[in-house]
Structures are given as structure tokens and as C-alpha cells.
Image (spheres, coloured by chain):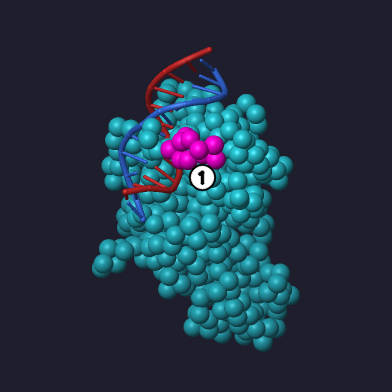
Chain colours: A cyan, B blue, C red
Amino acid sequence: MSTNKAAYEKNSAQSIYNFALLLTGKSLSEAVDLPENLENVRDRGKLGTLVEKYYFNHEPPNDHNPDFPEAGVELKVTGVKKDKSGKYVAKERLVLTMINYEHIVKESWHSNNFYNKCKRMLIMFYLFTKDVPVVERRFVIDPLLYEIPESDLPIIKSDWEKIQGKVLQGKAHEISEGDTFYLGACRKGAGGTKEKLKSQPFSEVGAPARAFSFKQNYLNQLLIENQSDSQLGASFNLSIEEATQKRFAKYIGDSIGELSLAINHFKRDKNHKGFHRELATKILAKGGSSVSEIEKAGIEMKTVRLQANGKPRESMSFPAFDFLKIGNEIWEESSFFEKVERKFLFVVFKVDGEGVERFEKVGYWNMPYEDRLEAERVWRDTQRRVAINAHDLPGMTESHVAHVRPKAKDGNDKGLTPQGDMRTKQCFWLNASYIAEVVSTI
DNA sequence: GCATGATCATGC
DNA sequence: GCATGATCATGC
């Protein structure tokens, strides 16, 4: 693994997630230096606190807000075990937040403690290993950035209302886990001795302390989807943007060599000009070759390789045009128009200070209106000049956005010009200097 | 060092 | 077989 992984930004769920990803495969004690005399190293409930403190270096607010309030992210750390088929499954339910009987009766679904705190959670999974101190238990699968999916919302809402309803009826002491489907009210705190019972607003009878939790089965569903992950953002309410970021996140900062190792030893053969693009495609497709969601959305994926100075050596090419046809085209129906109107996905590599090329970042972009006007101007100028002299077309110095240059298989790959001679096929290019500007903003 | 010209390996 | 995305090569 590389050593220049960045830390994270507390106000960005994506950044927090990316940082959490770096813990996959490690235990807390392997990832950070821990103080010598940690207490409660066998208390599994303690691991979440320790991860927050020593890995994220973060002090959560002591109120009803999520652990990372600015990002709206609640951190959860929970145990998994292997089932017979070798898949990771939840070891137990996921405890979310305490139920306050006095308070819940004053809440509504649209503003309640549980939803406010837990609507978005970063769930990290460690392998439950008995008798091993919690800080040495490994995070064996990628964490999950969970948002209550639209499809699950009605059930979770009705579960919450069911629990609230019992308290409203003065039956908090009668609540059971079987009342609900996804969201359970599990017993919290050891034993049921009288002094540990809580008061409830509409009955004199004391009720055991309970907490909202995701039932084990529900958590397992999430785990299964997290492990299969065959489609981008499947059922996690992730936009294509978020899902793409997620796919790439764990490779950011890796050198080409490290990426190559990680992607089935996919190495660059001499002169393989599509190597970086193929790497990106493989990451996006998780080993397969299809990137159907990206294609369906009409997203234009481009790789950009920055030199150590932050600028790409090369301009960015588009398909060749036909000297004879361009004269009859209209801008809005041209292929260059269609390209510059698209959403771009830039996969950016950069050479670091030691000359090692690393995977820098990914980002979406679409061309600002003024620049599309400039692209249009270059296209129109090209159309005009092809009719006059197909050997005199807009060069790189004539526009800060785009130019025209050869695009051919070899020296024989030529097209007939309106002047009746043959010329190497040409295409539109986005200037390297323009790409440098653009990529610095994503 | 940049603009321009030439062409490569690959996937479909 | 060829279009494609991308990179190499050259000249000033």
C-alpha cells in the first residue's frame, strides 16, 4: 500500500468513508499507535469509541447529533462472522441509539432522535474473534456508507411508530423485539433488576431500558449487498457519482505498480496506449469488463495523466470527423457537440515528486457554457475552413479550449477533402492546458 | 517546452 | 477490419 494516503475531512461523508476504507484488512492496533495501558480491551462495545478516538482522531459531540455532525454521519463498528459458505454475516444486531421513553412520546417521525442520528451511518465490520482483544480484531470487509433506502423507509417508519405507540399506551414494559420488522427495540443493559428499570410517561410500571437496533437479519441483508455489490449503488440510494467515488476510493494514492498488483497483475505491455483507461475500467467494473451504468448514463470517461507539474502532456482527443460531411452538419447534431454536452468522468493519475505515477483522484465535470460556446466557435471555424482548405484548420494557439489535429491509424489513414485531395484524418481535441485547468477544479 | 504531426494496441 | 482513446515523435 502506498504511504501518501491523505487524512480526511470531517464535513464530508465521502472523505470519512474513504478514510475508513483504508482500515480494511487491518486491526486498529495495526493501523495506529495505541497508548500502552488501554482498559477494557475485551469489551466489544468499546471498539467503536477507540476507532473514533485513535483512528479518526475525533471527539464526537455529547448530544443527540451524529458522531460527525457536519457530515451527518454516525459511526458504527460491529462484528461479523463467517457462515458455512464462507460469507461474512452479522454476529449480532446493530444497536443504534437508546430509547428515551419520556422523550419519544413528544416526537414525530418527521423529527425524531433516532432518524436524526442514524439516517446516514458509516458501518465498519470487524471479524469477531473470541478471546482476542478488540483492538486486534481485523476489519475484514469494506465499510458501508448506509443511508436508509427509500424502499426500506416505510417499514422502518412503521416500526418506529409501533414502538412509540406502545409507550404512548403506557406499555413500554411490554415492548418486545417481535413487535417490529427491521428496526427493533432491544434490551440494553444487563439483567432486569428493579433498580435498572426506567420510568415511562403513561404508566407507573417500570420498563427495561431498550435501544433502537437493526435486527440481525436486516443487517445481514446489508452485508450481503455490500459484499456482492454487483451493480453500482445497488439499493443503497447512492447516486452514480457517489457509487463511482466508492469504487475508486480505496485505490486513491496507489502507484501504478500497486494498482497493477491489485487488479489481477494487470501490467502494461510496451506501447499499450489504453492501459490506464483499462485499469480504470477494471476498477469500475470490479474485475469484469462492463461499465453499463456509466454507459447508460451517457457518461464520457476519460483518463488524464498529469506530470509532476500538474499538467497533462497530452491533449484529449475525440472521434475523427469526415472532411466531406462536416460541411453539411449543423453544430447541434455534430458528434463534437454531443461530446462536449456530456457529463465527463475524469480518472486522474499524477506523477509524484519521486517520479512515481499514482492514482490521484476521480471527478465528474461538465463543460461550462462559455467554453461550450468556444468549442462551437472552433467547430464552426473548422467547418468554414475545411471548405476552403482542409490543410489549414484551427491550431492549438487559436483557442484556449479546443483545436484540430490528426487522428489516424497510420500514414495511410486519410480522407478525401472538398478540394479533391487526401488528407490524414483529423479530429477535435481539448487543449492540454485547458484540461489542466479543468482537472485542478474537480 | 510547446505545438504539431504521426501512429500505436486494443476491443468490439 | 476498423474506430477509438491515447501516446509517441519531431521540429522549432
Residue at 62% across / 74% down in the picture? A198
- At label 1, the amino acid type is Asp
Q: Is residue A171 above or below residue A247?
A: below
Q: Chain of mark 1?
A: A
Residue marked by disc 1: A322
Residue at 36% across / 66% down in the picture? A89
Image quadrant assignment for residue A376 = top right
Residue at 41% across / 61% down in the picture? A229
Decide: few, some or many residues near mark 1? Use Cα within 10 Å; few <14, some 14-19, many ≥20: some
Residue at 48% across / 57% down in the picture? A295
Query: Residue most toward the right?
Result: A106
| B10, A420: nearer the viewer | A420
| A106, A12: nearer the viewer | A12
Q: Is residue A159 above or below residue A71?
A: below
Per the rendered image, the range of residues in magenta is: A414-423
Can residue A362 be spotted in the picture? no
